[in-house]
Image (cartoon, grey):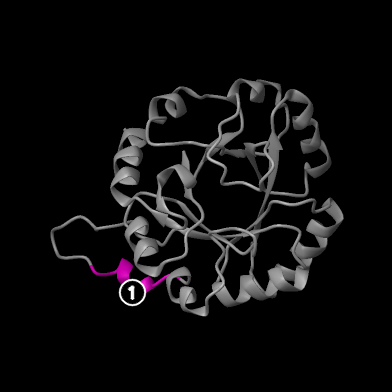
């Protein structure tokens, strides 16, 4: 199961979370978000420090993963040139789109990025879900994105902390793998482990693991991830 921790910004907090068994770390480049990455000082935390992944003592297990967690940039109806610039400046490996981006726009973005800017760039399309009807939107993106992220349908754009009824995903019959988001918190480990559907690839964690916007509770994450992995 992939574990993505989203909405990060502070270098020390990023480093601490990356020592956990996480696969992806998300950075929000949407100005209206309280987790917006606006300061250039955050760049030091976003770009992986590959040297920290080689400091292993003889005879001891590594303190963290052998490779850094993949970097994911989150955008909402942003200009393609802004996305391209951030992929280049921050070394992003994934682009997550949370707006009304069309399949044509996504195809053009991929051609611009791959291979010249970021070879093998992966694109995630987030969709707000409340009913089986909402899942029909997946059809227009089949073959255009690498992964979906299913989030709670609400007035805001992600990070609401609200859950939706996961059973509605039994109506998903697409071929694209998906991440499950929407208010997953420290007490949901058993619920996540019991969730089993075709194309379910992993989970997205955000607001319910925070002490402040963009600051994650590392110990809460450590305990939750241990429960999930075991």
Whether residue 115 appears in this view of the structure is no
Q: Is residue 50 magenta?
A: yes
Name the quadrant containing residue 131: top right
The number of discs equals 1
Residue to which mark 1 is pinned: 51
Camera-side residue: 34 or 21?
Answer: 34
The segment highlighted magenta reads: 48-55
Q: Is residue 68 left or right of residue 129?
A: left
Looking at the image, residue 199 lies above or below residue 29: above
* Percent position of residue 85, x then y: 67, 76
* Percent position of residue 201, x then y: 55, 38
Residue located at (69% from left, 38% from top): 128
* Percent position of residue 205, x then y: 48, 44
Q: Mark 1: which secondary structure?
A: helix
- Image quadrant holding the C terminus, namely top left
Residue located at (83% from left, 59% from top): 105
Camera-side residue: 199 or 186?
Answer: 186
Residue located at (83% from left, 41% from top): 140
Q: Is residue 163 left or right of residue 185?
A: right
Residue located at (21% from left, 65% from top): 56
């Amino acid at each position: 199961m992939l574990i993505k921790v989203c909405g990060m910004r502070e270098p020390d907090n990023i480093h601490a979370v990356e020592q956990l068994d996480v696969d992806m770390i998300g950075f929000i480049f949407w100005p209206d978000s309280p987790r917006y990455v606006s300061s250039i000082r955050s760049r030091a935390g976003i770009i992986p420090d590959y040297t920290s992944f080689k400091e292993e003592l003889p005879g001891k297990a590594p303190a963290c993963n052998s490779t850094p967690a993949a970097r994911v940039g989150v955008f909402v109806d942003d200009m393609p040139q802004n996305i391209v610039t951030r992929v280049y400046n921050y070394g992003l490996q994934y682009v997550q789109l949370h707006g009304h981006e069309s399949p044509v726009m996504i195809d053009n973005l991929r051609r611009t990025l791959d291979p010249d800017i970021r070879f093998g760039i992966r694109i995630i399309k987030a969709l707000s879900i409340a009913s089986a009807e909402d899942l029909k939107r997946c059809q227009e993106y089949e073959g255009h994105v690498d992964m979906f992220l299913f989030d709670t349908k609400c007035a805001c754009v992600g990070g609401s902390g609200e859950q939706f009824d996961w059973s509605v995903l039994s109506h998903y019959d697409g071929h694209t793998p998906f991440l499950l988001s929407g208010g997953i918190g420290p007490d949901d480990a058993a619920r996540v482990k019991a969730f089993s559907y075709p194309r379910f690839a992993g989970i997205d964690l955000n607001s319910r693991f925070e002490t402040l916007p963009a600051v994650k509770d590392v110990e809460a994450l450590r305990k939750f991830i241990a429960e999930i992995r075991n």
